[in-house]
Amino acid sequence: MRAVRRIAVVAAVLALVAGCGGDGGGGDGPGLAVGPSDAPVTLRVLAGSELLDLEPVLAEAGAATGVRIELDPVGTLDGAEAVASGTAEAGHDAIWFSSNRYLALQPAAQARLGTATDIMSSPVVLGLRRSVAERLGWVGRPVTWAEISAAAGARQFTYGMTDPSASNSGFSAVVAVATALAGAGSALTREQAESTVPALRDFFAAQTLAAGSSGFLQEAYVRRATGADPGEPVDGLINYESVLEGMNAAGTVPEPLELVRPADGVVTADYPFTVLAAASPEAKDAHRRLAEHLRTPDVQRAIAERTHRRPAVPGVLPAPAGTAVELPFPAQADVVDALLTSYFDKLRRPSRTIYVLDTSGSMAGDERIGALRRSLAGLAGADPSLTGQYRRFRGREQVTLLPFSTGPGSPQTFTVAEDDPGPDRQRIADAGAALQPDGGTAIYDGLQAAYRIAEQQIAADPDRFTSIVLMTDGENTSGADIEAFRLFAGARPAALREVPVFCVLFGETDAEEMEEVARLTGGRTFDARTAPLAEVFKEIRGYV
Amino acid sequence: MTAPAGRRSGRRVLSWLLALVLLGVIGFVVFRDVGGQEPEPVAPTVVSGVIGSEKAAFFADERVRNAFLAHGLDVRADPAGSRQIATTVRLDGYDFAFPSSSPAADKLLAQRPTARTYAPFSSPMAVATFAPIVDLLTQAGVVAPGSSSFDVRRYLELAAAGTRWDQLPGNTTFPARKDVLLSTTAPCQSNSAAMYLGIASYVANADGVVADQGVAAQVTPSVQPLFRDQGYLPPTTEVLFEDYLSAGMGRVPMALVYEAQYLAEALSPDPVLPADARLLYPSPTIFSRHTLVPLSPAGDRVGELLTSDPQLAELAAQHGFRPTDPRPFAAAFRDRGLPEPPQLVDVVEPPSFDTLEGMLTLLGCAP
């Protein structure tokens, strides 16, 4: 078993290396290199991760234009922040996200953009298992967000959606449903954004699956639908029309998804391929050549066929029938802020996270225990960045810190107040600051203790997203081993089967074992060996 | 034997002569043709400019590229919002800037004085819409029956009342729960929205061009909702018009565009206008005078050619622009068997650059 797994890992690494072959530049991050390696120009593009599906089109475009494109995937909001702060300019020539609307909210970011060329589009819609859509009577007739919301409030179906502070599809859904339920005919005002809270509560009551990216959401949905993941299957998901149609076309779901495009309106991603103002003249020229090529009718058709997105160039495909209404997207930062704040602090099913934290002797030193303390302080509010503000501990959230070394330590649980979260956040930061390194590393004893805590907490208050975050810097040295955890994970009671473990790879951690823990529980791993620990803790917040 | 031989010899000389003449003719023809396309045997000079996005299709047109190449210029153009060109775009390395209006060009001139500017063509602001919307607007009194005139005052009244499409009486064709709002670009970035601001502020100012900051401060609050209520706005008119063409009525029921954008589609050999597409003219409207500001001698040459070369004027007309000489414009429509667009009489001037900037600052645009 172990040998087979090793081979798989080696093969995966080889595939990755092959994929990046001929990468002459930076090679930082999980960049995707496409096109001939001897191409005269390489365009380094900070991009939404969902654009990886364009790989074959971009490879052909590279061959045709001599412009090789390297996609460096990142979440929309993180990307916006990188542009606004100027760090994007250091390693990239262009950006390509599902929309530039987040950037438009920040004048500092706007000034850093050059020519933006729309390449394709895809509205954000609801995909439901066909039988559920039929049961609800939503096939073959217009359905409004109000109807969807009423059915969600009555728990007639469940769905998954991405974190709106991390991913454009989730935020587009929040905007669409809030605008439609406010009955506003124009862009939401701050007052409307705040007043829609009671109506929106119904809508978000049916969300039982969350994710930090539309790709992970899609995978988690499929794994649950096929039984590969231990959790309850979900009835539907909110995602790009193109992703949902792609899932149907790939046949990876046991039951096809019925696409519900709400009659009162949708928000559409328009994928502007945007060169940065600071890019070199060569890069600007390469951007122009590539953008022109991507907008030729043949390539537009290829994009439509392969990615199910709609062409940006008119006349390439017959115009869609009907009059799908586009809802206005708020252009004021305070409205967006109000929407996100009420989503996290008031609307969303509150979350419960148990942080299983390695405090063994090897964690000593500022770059280990110090980084951990600072990461927790960042989540408690010390991080002033845009993403830091949205990813901090939220009102109503339950946070448990469970340190472990030779054995599990004593857990401390905090529930963040809805109206005045500051003092509770401070208490979490203080508890983090008091962590002291000493002793061995009993990873699996710590994890099992966390599941026991989760069991009690779920019994007391079942209506929360519950997840475990495991941070360890080394191999398991005491207590139960991975075999024991395998048995434990397979025998979990139903309520705990939906609780994923998100593992942070740090220091000398055993990546392979951590991958298995994530796989066994429906979670995933995050790599803090190459990225700062605080950034990784922030990224995980999109998933819990 | 000698005679035939002599004759043969004479013939041989003749055929040599003929062959030489033929070679000469071929050589001349080849030389003339090659020379006609590239009078300078050296590689063409690359000239790059930043242009208002609505001229992107014109500069990308192979015939336009060739017309410039015939003069030894390889012209490359980056599209951008016109106000962006005047404010945020880094102009270093560009040979010319070609925004879509005289106020934007004035702003550039203040920073980069140059001896000459060129205004080879202009285009009035127009409303691209759909037949069912025209019917609804006619019932609502915004469009006079059977005309293509869009009454800005009546429209501003509807908008100020927060009227939604589904509240218009007898509306079964477009019952959207969306306000009756003309779609525009972002005024902070794009010239067409600034021209709209000029039109709306003129009407809101009791039919007078807003001429000073005091009046601007009085008028701006009443026109602000026209932009704010739309939410996020596209950065360029090209993006807006493409949304109109490809996404249809639900996304963009009516859009303020340059007349040239719509006409270029109508004149195109392969038009992609929706079957029920219609063009209306705001009353009053503003002409945008596309003004080229040279940043280098090569850029100056581009401006000169656009103004003086008859072929470029013809091509501009075929792209829907109204050249200074009206004849190529009329010819473009005659050649395609289409009615010539109306001569517009209800035309007002845009506010001065400073007044426009003052209003934009009041709208929240960074100065």
Image: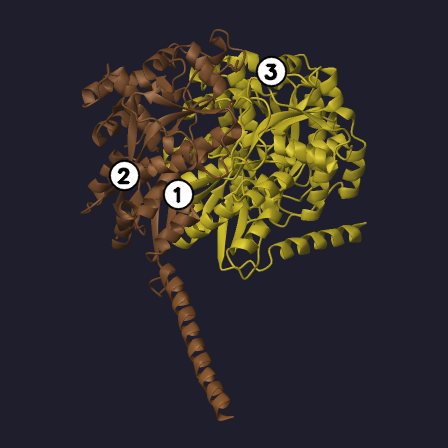
Chain colours: A yellow, B brown
Asked whether disc 3 touches disc 1, contact meaning CB atoms under 8 Å apart, the reply is: no
- Say what amino acid the circle numbered 3 marks: Thr
Q: The C terminus of chain A lies in which quarter of the figure?
A: top right
The residue pinned by badge 3 equals A144
- Label 1 SS: helix
Q: Residue furthest top?
A: B169
- Say what amino acid the circle numbered 2 marks: Asp
Q: How far, Cα to Cα, is label 3 from label 1?
A: 42 Å
Query: Does residue A441 appear left or right of residue A492 in this picture?
Result: left
Disc nearest the viewer among 3 and 1: 1
Closer to us: B243 or A277: B243
The residue pinned by badge 1 equals B58
The residue pinned by badge 2 equals B325
At which x and y percent is residue A56?
62, 48
Q: How far, Cα to Cα, is label 3 from label 2?
A: 53 Å
**Residue A158 position by quadrant:** top right
